[in-house]
Structure formats: structure tokens, C-alpha cells
Amino acid sequence: MATSKQSKANVESIVYLPLEQLRFDPLNPRLPPKFDGDDENAVLEWMLDDATIIELMNSIGENGYFEVEPLLVVRPQKGKDVFEVVEGNRRLAAVKLLNDPQLAPIKKHSVLEASKEAKEVPEELPSIIYPNRNSILYYLGYRHITGIKEWGPLAKARYLEQIRETLPEKSQEKQFQYLAKTIGTNSHYVGRLLTGLALYEEIADNDFYRLPGVNEQSISFSLITTALTYSNIVKFLGITSNNDPSLNQLVGRHLKELTSWMFEKGAENTTRLGESRNLKKLNAIVMNKAALASFRNRAPLDDAVMLTGVPTEVFRLAIAKSRGHLQNAREYIYKVREATDSDAEILGDIIEQANFLHRSLVAHHGNIDGCSLNR
């Protein structure tokens, strides 16, 4: 990692490089898996899919390019006069399109308009040349993980994997600890991100199991990492823990099922899982033989979960919360100045529902005291 003295020296050595000497970073952590980072046309299409590129073009076209935002570049081993832009790919895309709007594979009209209206069209960009890619990686971690321009979880995970590949041979635990210190988090979170990345790449390597509508754009990486916080789902996948990127014991068919449940949308444009908070229900289902069989046979999630112990927890939590709210109301009843018929109606409904629940418990569980609630 560069010292502050080295960093200062680099900042003072800004050079201006012409566009023809600058190329996109093929290892950009934000690029989708299996993406050909060497294909400029494909990179520009992916960049333009983000509407903010047009906004960035307009900003640079109006104000020019600020030297305080230099590109961070490295010279590839086989490229004497070409530099890879490790930091600043969006800015490079915006300037390339300002200079040549015909490069735009999509949104051609918007790109052309931005180019025509531009007052400033830089043909060379301020850059800091680093000796190798690794010397920039730690800065990227500060800027995009702990800094002001935060990456999403998937880009974070890819970045961490790149750093991990540069580390000397160490135990996995020590690697995670080192990475955690690098980005200012804990090692458990690092392990979960890397395990989530391994699962994501497994899904991508299997062509997203050819599930309709499931692809790199529709998959939420955050949902994968959130699912890994549930112990039964981790066991269902066959992996030893949510900190095991090796996936040595992964049950492939279970990962395919989980991918389908979480991301494949049905006729009503919803997934079998529905909302992310339903992961708790799915966590109960996957380790219950009867519930899992029911869910696999297309039973709705709420129907399948009824075959597990979760309904009991939900019931107990609901009545406990209800009691808490009623105790709250009791403390304030003497301070209520005006009562309405609606208030009395609601309280009467509460009494009726509470009596119904009590009678139902007594009817189904004979060892419960059957005393009346009207006391």
C-alpha cells in the first residue's frame, strides 16, 4: 500500500493523456460477470444503460473537465502507448462520447444532443500513472467502500476478491481480517460478501439456469447475501457456513431452486419468495420435510410455512404486541377528553376477537384453563 509520501508524489505528477491512449478497465469491479471488458462497444452500452452518463456528459460539456478529478491509470505490459483507466471509467466514457457521439450503441439521440450542446469537449484528460494495478486497489477501497462514492455490494465483493488474489498465502481467516481492516468493516461481513459472490458467479456460470427473466440485471446480489444470514438456507445450500467462498459442498440443484424462488417471476410479476422479509419463512420451510415438499409442489409460501413451527411464533408475537398496545391505551384512558362511537366499536371488536382466540385455544388444547375473558 502506498505511503502518504508516495501518494503526494503521485498527485503532483499529473499528466494529460490523449483519448486514443486511454482504454476502459477490463477488470472493473462494477462490470457484470462474463462481461468482455475489452469490448469498448459493450462497455459503452453498459455505461449508457445508466442514465447518469448523459448527465455527466452535460456537466463536462458545460464546465469542462476538472483537473482535481484525474484518472488513475496503469500501463498494460503489452501496451507501450496505451493506458488502462482503473479509476474514472464513467468519466472516460462521457468524454469519449462527447468527442464522438457515433460511438454510442444506444441512446444515440441523447448522446448526440449532449455533444452538440457542449461548450467544452476535452481531447485529453488529466491522469496519474501508477506502476501497477495493485497500487491503486487500496485507494479504490477507500473511495468506493468507505468513502463518498460508495459502490453497491456486488462491486464491493468483486473488489475484495481482487485484493484477496494479491495477498500472500495466508489462512482464510487472516485474509478476511486483513480485508476487513482495509475497508473498515468486520471479517464476518467480508466472508459473507465473498461467499455471496461465489454463489452469484456459480449462478452466472450456469447461465442463470436459463430461468425466464433471470439475468445479471434482474438478480439482486443483496438478496443473496441477505439469504446467507439465515442458517437453514445456508444448510440447504450444503455449504459449511456463510463465510465459505470455496462452496466445496454446494448442492447445485438446491442453489438452482433458491435462485428460482428468489428471482423468477410468475404470471403476476412476483417471485415465489415475494419480499425479502419472507426469507424468514423460507428459512423455516427449507428444513422442514413436509413444508418443503408442499412448497416444491407450488403451494404458496404462507401455506407451506403453516406446516412448520413459524405460525406459533407469529401468533405468540402478535398477542404479546397486542397486550402491550392495550396496556398503553389503559394508561391514557383517563386522559381522553372526548370518546367516540368508533372508539367503543373498536374496543368491542377487540373483546370479540380475543374471546374467539381464547375459545379456539381451549377447544384445541384441553390442558388450558377455559376461564372466560369477561372478568
Image: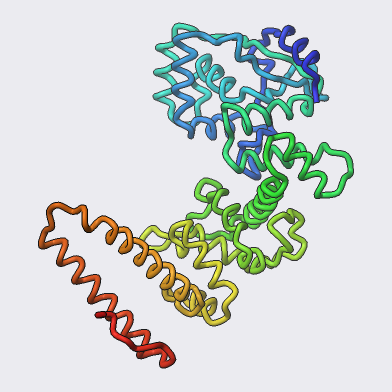
In this view, the residue farthest toward the right is 169
In this view, the residue farthest toward the left is 341
In this view, the residue farthest toward the front is 334
Res 114 quadrant in image: top left
**Residue 96 drawn at (x, y percent):** 56, 18
Q: Residue at x 39, y 89 (%)?
A: 364
Residue 15 drawn above or below residue 319: above
Front-most of residues 75 and 235: 235
Residue 45 drawn above or below residue 328: above
Res 208 quadrant in image: bottom right
**Residue 197 drawn at (x, y percent):** 66, 49
Colour pattern: rainbow
**Residue 8 drawn at (x, y percent):** 75, 11
Q: In the rendered view, does 177 fall on the left or right side of 256?
A: right
In this view, the residue farthest toward the bottom is 366
Q: Residue at x 63, y 56 (%)?
A: 203
Residue 197 drawn above or below residue 48: below
Q: In the rendered view, does 155 fall on the left or right side of 80?
A: left
Query: Could one spot residue 235 in this view of the protein?
Result: yes
Query: Could one spot residue 298 in this view of the protein?
Result: no
Front-most of residues 257 and 206: 257
Q: In the rendered view, does 295 fall on the left or right side of 239?
A: left
The image quadrant where one finds the C terminus is bottom left
**Residue 200 drawn at (x, y percent):** 63, 52
Res 32 quadrant in image: top right
Q: Residue at x 46, y 15 (%)?
A: 59
The image quadrant where one finds the N terminus is top right
Residue 183 drawn above or below residue 335: above
